[in-house]
Image (cartoon, rainbow, N blue to C red):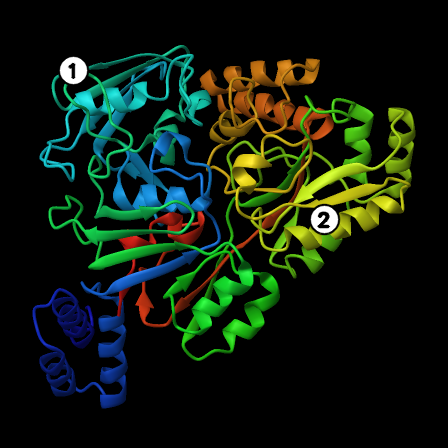
Amino acid sequence: MRDMKKVFVENQKEKFEKGGMSRRQFITSMVAAGVAMPTVLGMADSVLAATPKKGGKLRHATGYGGTTDTIDPSTSTNGFTQNVIYTRGNHLTEVGQDGKLRGELAESFEPDQEAKNWAFNLRKDVTFHNGKTLTADDVIATFNIHRGEDTKSAAKGLVTAVKDIKKDGDNRVIFELEDGNSDFPFIVSDYHFMIMASDGSGNVDVTAKDNSTGGYALGNHESGVRASFKRNPNYWKENSAHFDEVEILSVVDPTARQSAMLNGDVDIADSIDPKTVGLMARVPTVEILETTGTQHYTFPMRLDVEPFGNLDLRLALKYAIDRDELVEKILLGHGVAGNDIPVNGSMPFFNDSIAQRTYDPEKAAEHYKKSGHSGPIQLSVADAAFAGAVDAGQLIAASAKKAGIEIELVREPNDGYWSNVWNKKGWCACYWGGRPTQDWMYSSAYTADNTWNDTAWRDTPAAKRFNELVVSARAETDEAERGVLYGEAQQLLHDDGGAIVAMWANYIMAHSKKLAHGPDVAANWENDGNKISERWWFA
């Protein structure tokens, strides 16, 4: 027989959580049931802290942003613009706080038997901030922005396999793919694919502030400075978007971000430098939140910029980096060494048989000699890439020197780093938030058709084979065979690719203890999947 007192307590807690009784009524009922007063008070405080409340202004200092940022989702390149997208808009699907994929604007989705046609059933009565009702036409018009030869979308490579998009009534959209893709519902959750209102003629104004459906309406937007929002009173998603206002501030300098948090000028600061975690954790008003996920720090070498087209030179630099030292001195243990592939054991079909590449100055010197190169090699760094990137560059230069390789460190300005340095200069520091699946990660940054292929790894025999493997694995329904294909793809990246994946870094943020959140915190991106604005509240 169930403990009746326990049942009563749980029922009262549920009533209290849902607002069915006041704090005083809850305490009185618990004491009457024989629960000790200290226990009751702790229980009441716990319930109140876990119950979302409306109100207040969230001030978020993020370590990303630049003066060339726009509100066009298709050109988003950093964590600031991604945060803006998730604050103001929605997607067909989303990765939840538990790491599982679920429908967002699509209440359901299903494939045909070969996963070549995917149907998404849209929610009804969802309205944009401009008052327009969401229909299939808006979804089609939004995705067409990212398709075609002339598109400027950074996500073009994710939808090159889409042959056609058509509607089946006002609330059903069907994507026809070139080949089967079991991961396609993950792809449409990519932040670039924020659904926007169309004008009835198949066009979308990507510069409009009111063409999104999210929990907050975008107000003021200053590129590289701040973005402000007010809660959408007609938000379709229940029990979400609890703040009255949200302000996202671009504070690229790690010290300035830390000071803003410690001084109480902001409520949350992301991308905390591991060197300051201990100091900030001692502050009574601040809480440190650390999650492990798919974030990794890289040093991409562009094969279309000399001397990085030379395989022996790439291998020399890969062996010349002391990854364990970087994890120890840059991450201070808040992460693990990378192995020059952008996927890890958190993703399906990971090949764990590839030997970890370690620091080997003798091998580095051997490959460097075979490359025929001489003279300094420039490495561009800025802490805009990740906290500690400049220090990491200095450590790399020191470890490479022991192999007879001279690295000239170029300290770039933080402002404009993502528009002027990354994906342009031959060798630089970079971060990737990662993706939940291998296909999504490869299609974002490593396939030949993607503008974010920051290593320009496209034309070597290994790169061509890699692209064939990605297409084949995407359509493969046999899981064992799919694992074989992905295993070969990872090996090719490891052996021939231009990316030095040096470290897998934990997400570290600091926030006011006045902030509260649910039991799970998403790790697909930092900042609870960059949805703190929607998911958190003031206790």
Q: Which residue is mark 2?
A: 393
Q: Quadrant of the C terminus?
A: bottom left
N-terminal label among 2 and 1: 1
Q: Is residue 515 above or below residue 310?
A: below
SS for dot 1: loop
**Image point (33%, 38%), residue name:** 71
Q: Residue at x 63, y 34 (%)?
A: 341
- Residue 524 appears in view: no
Q: Residue furthest bottom?
A: 37
Of residues 487 and 249, which is closer to you in this image?
A: 249
Q: What residue type is disc 1 on?
A: Asp
Q: Which mark is residue 168?
A: 1
Q: CA distance from mark 2 to mark 1?
A: 54 Å
Residue 426 lies left or right of residue 287; in this view the side is right
Callout 2: SS: helix
Q: Amino acid at mark 2?
A: Gly
* Mark 2 and mark 1 residues within 8 Å of each other at the beta carbon: no
Residue at x 55%, y 64% (from the top left corner)? 255
Q: Nearer the viewer, residue 315 or 177?
A: 315
Position in image of residue 107 (x %, y %): 20, 34
Q: Is residue 320 above or below residue 516?
A: above
